[in-house]
Image (spheres, rainbow, N blue to C red):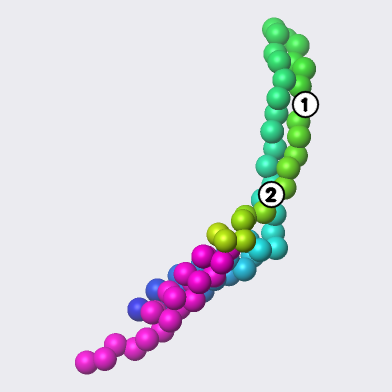
Amino acid sequence: MKALLWVGVLVLILGIASLFVAIPRTERQGIKAGDIDIGVQTHHSERVPPLVSAVLIAGGVLLMITGGRKRGS
């Protein structure tokens, strides 16, 4: 049961971090002809949609509640 609690904490932290931290991505477009390589690299930083962050946060809280409960008999 303790493992489920810690997984919940991890998912909760990831959900909160996904609200603030952007995910970097690099694209390369161009042509290559023999030894010549002509291209452009573009860098993008995209955030996770807020709905995904909310699902991660809610899932983390549910896992923490489930993992924190003590077993009855």
Q: Residues within 10 Å of mark 1 (few under 14, many from 20)?
A: few
Residue for point 22% across, 92% down: 73
On the image, numbered disc 1 is attached to which residue? 40
On the image, numbered disc 2 is attached to which residue? 46
Q: Main secondary structure of the magenta part?
A: helix
> SS for tag 2?
strand
Q: CA separation, marks 1 and 2?
A: 19 Å
Q: At label 2, which amino acid type do we have?
A: Glu
Horizontal and vertical percent position of residue 53: 58, 63
Rendered image quadrant of residue 27: top right
Rendered image quadrant of residue 30: top right
In the image, residue 30 sits, relative to residue 59, either above or below, namely above
Any magenta on residue 28? Answer: no
Horizontal and vertical percent position of residue 13: 58, 69
In the image, residue 33 sits, relative to residue 64, either above or below, namely above
In the image, residue 6 sits, relative to residue 22, either above or below, namely below
Horizontal and vertical percent position of residue 62: 44, 76
Per the rendered image, the range of residues in magenta is 53-73
22 left or right of 12?
right
